[in-house]
Amino acid sequence: MTWLITGGAGYIGAHVARSMSAAGEPVVVLDDLSSGVTERLPEGIPLVRGSLLDRELLDRTFAGHGVTGVVHLAAKKRVGESVERPLMYYRENLHGLTVLLDAVVDAGVRRFLFSSSAAVYGVPDVELITERTPAVPINPYGETKLAGEWLVRATGRAHSIATGCLRYFNVAGADRPELADTGVFNIIPMFFDRISRGEAPRIFGADYPTPDGTCIRDYVHVSDLAEAHLAAARRLADRDASGELGDLTANIGRGEGVSVRELADLVAEITGDRTPPVIGARRPGDAARAVASVSLAAEELGWTARRGVREMVESAWAGWRSHHPAVRTG
């Protein structure tokens, strides 16, 4: 069988494509390269360049590569941008998914794994977020992910497709420097960016009801996340083969919280730049604590994150320096 990985030239997608291919799973990547990079993919993984909105391209890809399963990662994912441009987010994330699922049904594909997000939960006031925690997203990005889950499950039920939805928490790190996250939209690269420009790292809010006053988050290494996709894809294949369909929805994190201040201290230690962080105002919608319950992923997928936060920061820093060779370091 061949897995189609949409968005497979992106930061997360390239890790997933490499992990699945290395494990012996044939894969083909579809990416419009709006944020993907062809060099992230090794030789031997075919790349189809194009949009999910191009139904003819999807049909040719399914037929030409003998696709029997889909791992769908392609999406717009900047929360702030989703607030400013909700129409684009619903078009790209939800309408694009509709076009893709139409093609999946017509091609007789029976395995579909959806890249979701902890953003579906909104701002829950709980110690650990389980898959049964109410999903109340607070921005268009989270809304498109939750509606995407609904659409995936409904299509699976109607057309006997084994489906899965993986709700990522905060993804960081890199398997190798050339695969690192080059965007400046998540907290670790945001710290690196300011350090590289000779500025103090910025913390958004230090008056939360947490031990050190800063937000607490669950971070997962992107290589662990890639291994979770491999485990989930194989679980869907087993379900399909046995006739045990239905949806599998699981949180993907470490189940451990790290405060933003603790993270800033670790970044300072690893980069050698000990400029004290500056404290800014809270950002709207930031929960004081967002940590995953990960027991279901362990039970259903046999998967547990193996890499710690230090490894995430060290590998992310190596990647940042490889893409910014003139970076100032302490």
Image (spheres, rainbow, N blue to C red):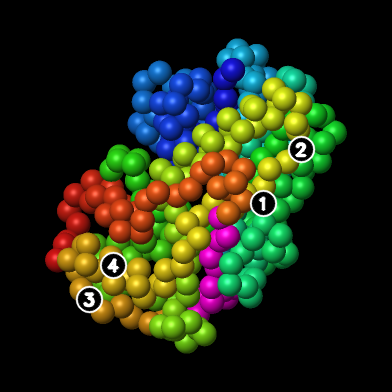
- Estimate the spatial distance between the alpha carbons at disc 2 and disc 3, rounded to whole Å: 51 Å
What mark, if any, has residue 145 been given in the picture?
Answer: 1
Q: What is the CA distance from the residue labelled 2 to the residue labelled 1?
A: 19 Å
Q: For the residue marked with disc 1, what is the amino acid? A: Lys
Residue 160: image x %, image y %? 80, 29
Find numbered disc 4 in the image and state the secondary structure of the residue it sits on: helix
Residue identified by numbered label 2: 246
Label 3 and label 4: CA atoms lie apart by 12 Å
Look at mark 4 in the image and give the residue it sits on: 266
Label 2 element class: loop
Dot placed on the residue nearer the N-terminal end, 2 or 3: 2
Q: Are marks 3 and 1 in contact (CB under 8 Å)?
A: no
CA separation in Å, label 3 and label 1 = 37 Å
Q: Earlier in the sequence, mark 4 or mark 1?
A: 1
Q: Are marks 4 and 1 in contact (CB under 8 Å)?
A: no
Q: What's the residue type where badge 2 is placed?
A: Gly
Q: Nearer the viewer, residue 13 or 190?
A: 13
> Percent from the top left, x then y, of residue 201?
31, 72
Residue 134 visible in rendering: yes
Q: Nearer the observer, disc 2 or disc 4?
A: 2
Which comes sooner in the sequence, label 2 or label 1?
1
Residue 253 lies, in percent from the top left, at: 51, 55
**Residue on which disc 3 sits:** 275
Neighbours of disc 1 within 10 Å: few (<14), some (14-19), many (20+): many
Query: What is the crowding at mark 3: few (fewer than 14 residues within 10 Å), some, or many (at least 20)?
Result: some
Element carrying mark 3: loop
Magenta span includes 330: no
Residue that appears at 58% across and 26% down: 4
Look at the picture and state if 30 lies above or below 293: above
Q: Which residues are magenta?
A: 282-294
Kindly state the secondary structure of the residue where label 1 is placed.
helix
Q: Earlier in the sequence, mark 3 or mark 4?
A: 4
